[in-house]
Image (spheres, helix red, strand yellow):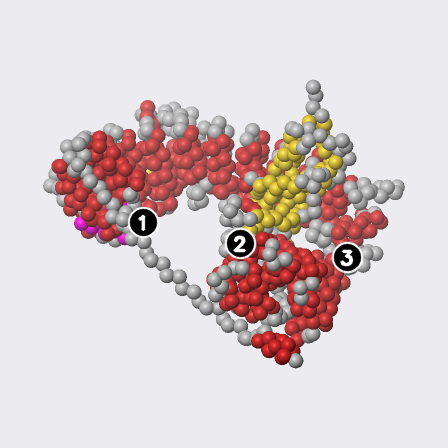
Amino acid sequence: MAAVLKKRALAEFSQVIQEPPKPPLKRLRITQKQKSIEPEIILNNASSSQETLEQLQNFSQNQLPVSCEYIDGILRALLDHCCKSKHAAVRAKIASLVAQLVATEGFNPAAVPDDIIPLLKNEESHVVKSQYIMCLLSIGKALPQDTKLHQVLVQSAKQNLNDTSHLVRCKCLDLIGWLGSPDQRLAEESQSGKSTQRVLGEFTHDQDPRVRTCAFQAMLHWHNRGIKLDAGIYNAVCDALRDDYEGVRLVTVSLIWTLSQLYPDSLVKVKNTEEVRLIDDAFGKICNMVNDISMVIRVKASSLLGTMHDVSVKFLEQTLDKKLMSNMRRKTSAHDRAKEHFAAGEWATGSKWASDAPKDLIQENDVSVIDTGACGAFVHGLEDEYLEVRTAAIESLCQLATRSPSFAALSQDSLVDMFNDEIEDVRLNAIRSLKRIAIHLTLREDQLEIITGCLKDFSYDMREALHEMFECIHMGTKTCLNECIMALLDNLKRYPQDRLSIWKSCQYIGKNHPHLTLALTTELLSTHPYFDTPEPDMDDPAYIAVLILVFNATVDNPTMVPLFPDHTFRHYQYLRDSIPEHVPGLNLPGVCSMHKVKKDASQELSRFLNNALERLSKVETMNRNSAQQLMEVTIRDLSRLSELEPKLSATTESMSIYIQCHLLVSKAVADLKTSGRGHKVCNVTSTSMSKVKKLTQKLESLFVGLTISDLAVIRQLGLKAYCLQLLATIHGNSRDAACLQMCDDVYQRVTELESFLSTHNMPFDPFTARLVSELGELESRQPAIFLRVLQSTLGLHKIDIHTLSNNVQKAHVVIHEPVSESDNPIRFTAGLTVGVQFIAIIENIDDSHNLRLKIKYPDQEEQYVSIKQADCKAMGGNKYRVSTEVILSHTLWSDPCYIELSLAKAFTSNYNSSDTEISSTNKLETVDLCTPVKVYVSPRPGKR
């Protein structure tokens, strides 16, 4: 009896009392700001100037930047030593350090010029002077609102403009450009009343080309600071275009472009006392620089031409004319010339009025064969020997053509000629430029011959760009359309992997040319008015491309329908169901319209999905068996729904995986509560929780568009899987070393999840809240302690199914190359390597850096290879195209076997690391993105 009472007493003490979960406590982390060490610079102890320079160099390399509180003392020490030093190199280095110190954020250097300016006046070394001026410039940039200080600094710079060294004059002009303004005037008596604008104008004629460059550059600095330049400097700037120094010409080209944008409609005088708009004259000047001897200037000029949108059409059209014409000469009719002769009133012989009148003396400088103005500028730019110039010319030509239909028509031949360029990037640029102006163009037969010749190019980028161009451009004649279609079919025969791109191109060609397609219908469908023709094979991609073109042309031209043979109607139904994105809905005789039926069915399926998800809201109030049965039925319905309606597949699949995780967790919790420490139950629970972990990782990795709320519930569900697996492992073998590692993993997961939820202000479910509260108070991570915590938390588990966002998209991969299961093996010498071309289109991937190429050999060995970003091309909208070469290698096999190639996505289990920051310290995991393709390979023995 005593034993029974003792047992009951112990039982009463061992009862578990469930308390409502407490909200997690906010932890405050108090960090003490580290005290900065005061930098030291001791220059007086140096025995030589070389040692002083070494100390200054060490200070600049090891102790910069310094705290603002120590800058005053360091500056005082440096400036004091600068006054005493007799070596120019030391003073120059000190001045350089002062310029770096005054630019420190948070430091106010307003008092420093009072020390620098006297040193500048007394300095004799030109190098040190230039460094002092750089100090003043740094001070002025650090105090952008102090206009009075700027005036003082500019005045100091003007006083040194007459220095004999070009270096000092250049630095002074730089300071004036950054801090001065055109209306500032000098205070010296010798230059009283002279504005800063006039001073800069004088230095544009300096004997040193570097000073001239800085003078023009200072004017550009004024413009960049928002100060409007005076239009009167235009003629001086134009004269500088003939400067011998490349830097001067480069700056003046930019300055002329700037003035043309500020005063486009101002009138300027040209030869023969004519007046033209400033932007037209500037356009001619910049066009003339396309023939400059310097490649850099030619690139600059070619690039600027495309931004001059207000140029008159008559000047614009001259850029594509190869004939040499006089620059800016006004063309008059014969009637106007006769009127001028009659008004002259001069005597003549009578054969022609005023034929022997005195002529004006022609000056030698007025006749120029080189200055061609705008004439042929783009012709020269497109034929330049440097690809940089040709690329810039194509870009500018395209920008101007998009704004002028007449100029676009003239530029068509020039762009088509660039399709034959030897550089692939230039050809690609020409194709894309022609696509941008395709709305203004109509292709001729001779041009189409050049364009279709590029479809034979080995480069996939070239062929794809041409397919996209054909989607936009208009054909002029039936012959053009026929040649284009035949070229696309030949492209399909050469490169079967272009199938989807060619089908899309045929779709838009048919939409854009319905009447021309009507004239080719019988030829394209191979029909005869009297004889029956054999039915084409529906597996032929070329025949499908022709049908796509014809069906899309029928939308706007229904008179084509009587020309269709009988089998075409059956083929339409098949294509409409298999590739609806390329085949439009048509009302064909004998073909029932499934569009309305499919629309109604789609609405019904969406309604069914909503009803299925609404039923899950009652799971929390059901008993365990009923809830599990409902989840199983819902998973089955969602799987079937995903097959019936592809548009809902991402939503249904994500919800199906999420419900499956809940189902497995619910069964595991029930088994652990009822069966306890059974070895078989623990093994089953551990296996099922491993599956839940993989499923939650799959949810996060494969689906794009999940909200923060979705991620919060998914990660809390994954945490339950980790805890249940740990609980089952402890029950199975509590002394195993794996338990200690799993305890650390669970603790880390709890910490990361707490940080994630707190950062995004997401609610904690009761299970997570209790776990965070209990584990936060633990002093040890022993399995026994975790067992007590998890057992007390297990009762808080509830089935609360959250409806995920319906805007999710699943990652989708289509592998175009290599073709799966080829009969011809790829042979290579065992131990060496062989390259296999791999081309795939990936959709709904947020970051291409995490893509991995998965290689699986017949011996089950797996390799994951990172993909170079140069081989991964972004196509917009989370869509990428991977084109790379896979390197395969293996030892000798007895028979040829298949190697599986696929794409996978790498991720880390750390919640706080972004997708683009997957480091080597985190444990990488992968999830497959597609079904692998099989490559038939045969390693052969090496030759002896």
CA distance separating discs 1 and 3: 63 Å
- Does residue 845 belong to the magenta stretch? no
Q: Nearer the viewer, residue 766 or 19?
A: 19
Q: Quadrant of the C terminus?
A: top right
Q: Which residue is mark 1?
A: 226
Q: Which residue is mark 2?
A: 910
Q: Residue at x 58, y 41 (%)?
A: 867
Q: Earlier in the sequence, mark 1 or mark 2?
A: 1
Residue 133 coordinates in the image, percent (x, y): 22, 40
Task: Classify residue 150 as left or right of residue 735.
Answer: left
Which kind of residue does numbered mark 2 sit on?
A: Asn
**Bounds of the magenta span?**
102-111
Q: Earlier in the sequence, mark 1 or mark 3?
A: 1
Q: Which residue is mark 3?
A: 587
Q: Main secondary structure of the magenta part?
A: loop
Can residue 128 be spotted in the picture?
Answer: no
Q: Residue furthest left?
A: 189
Q: Residue at x 18, y 43 (%)?
A: 77
The quarter holding residue 900 reads top right
Which kind of residue does numbered mark 1 sit on?
A: Gly
Q: Nearer the viewer, residue 799 or 100?
A: 799
Q: Earlier in the sequence, mark 2 or mark 3?
A: 3
Q: Residue at x 34, y 36 (%)?
A: 251
